[in-house]
Amino acid sequence: MSSFRKDPFGEAWVLMSPERGLQPSDFGSASHPPGTSPLVPGRERGLPGEIQALRASSSQANAPDWRARVLPMPGTPFSQRPFRESSAGLYVSGTASGYQELIVEHPDPAMTLEAMPREHMSDLLRLYRDRLAFLAERPGVRHVQLTRNVGRAAGALYDHPHAQVLALPVTNRWVEEEAASASAHHREHGRCLFCDVVSAETASRERVVTSNASFVAIAPWASKTPFETWILPREHQSAFSSLASNRLEALGDILQTVLHAFGVALDHPPYNMILHTRPTPSDATYHWHIEMLPRLTRQAGFDWGSGYYVNPTPPEDAARFLREAAALAEVAS
Ligand SMILES: [Zn+2]
Ligand SMILES: [Zn+2]
């Protein structure tokens, strides 16, 4: 049976999941040959029952005629048993409780996020927001996240456009590390670190990829991998679940611009899109953002064997390259 173990040397919680065995799909390669997506309309019955869907009001649950669907992740190791943490001597473990959901983002298996019509994009972002808000309120949930893995090299389980939502009773080490730096900055200066970064970057523009009235996309100062791009709201907001409905279009626009720029500059690379957020909107020091990480095989940043990253593309160059690519994509469309 799966369970969490807490790393006694740090903030990491590791899921031990022996029943999942050594399935290739557990190690990040899509298990379905192209053209055989199990997520297309007409194949609903082979999947877990849907939790929520955007579908024609005349249609029935778990039947075709939908625009997007939310299901429990097939084969998820998480269950809704109450979370219990226990320690024995040096070691802490916990129940593998939590929620893992699959959002099927479009009926067409060949659709991409950047090609989605504006209205569909806004509906999808609203669906992300509403799932995260709902799951954040479940008892015991301490962390929520949304990830999109696109392309097999990025660990996608399906070629079909999809996102994964996780809501867990344990914290996430990367968010905790950001939050620790941000609260230290807040204690010293009385301001949000992310807000200060947004101000500094929009003033200098050197690392700005693109921006609009509500959001800015930057290549971060210490980008760990080439063309790493963060999208941040200009206004302070700690939880994605409090994103106002009238900001959905602007967020969809900036996401699509960044992806068009990746497409032109990097030839449609595999990528990971990771939403970092607090579950609930009560944190003056944390600021939600989306990290976009293209997976470039030839020019990949790498961990230097000991926790140091080597990035061959400085973010100033990456931002300039992506700005030019975004302008080209604009002309072409
Ligand atoms: Zn802020
Ligand atoms: Zn982050």
Image: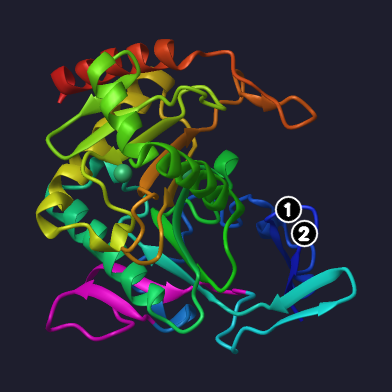
- For this view, does 235 lie left or right of residue 197? left
- Separation of disc 1 and disc 2 at Cα? 6 Å
Q: Are marks 1 and 2 in contact (CB under 8 Å)?
A: yes
Kindly tell me whether mark 2's CB lies below 8 Å from ligand 2.
no
Q: Disc 1 residue type?
A: Gly
Find residue 67 and report its horizontal and vertical position in percent: 23, 65
- For this view, does 251 lie left or right of residue 152? left
From this viewpoint, is residue 214 visible? yes
| 265 or 323, nearer to the observer | 323
Q: Residues within 10 Å of mark 2 (few under 14, many from 20)?
A: few
Residue 44: quarter of image: bottom left
Q: Is residue 141 above or below residue 328?
A: below
Residue 10, label in figure: 1
Question: Which residue occupies 59% across, 18% down?
Answer: 311
> Helix or strand or loop: what does disc 2 sit on?
loop
| Quarter of the picture holding the C terminus | top left
Q: Disc 2 residue type?
A: Asp
Q: Is residue 201 above or below residue 156?
A: above
| Quarter of the picture holding the N terminus | bottom right
Q: How crowded is mark 1: few (under 14 residues within 10 Å), some or many (20 or more)?
A: few
- For this view, does 2 lie left or right of residue 229? right
> Helix or strand or loop: what does disc 1 sit on?
loop
Residue 7, label in figure: 2
Question: Which residue occupies 36% across, 58% down?
Answer: 283
Q: Is residue 321 above or below residue 161?
A: above
From this viewpoint, is residue 16 visible? no
Q: What stretch is highlighted in magenta?
A: 50-76
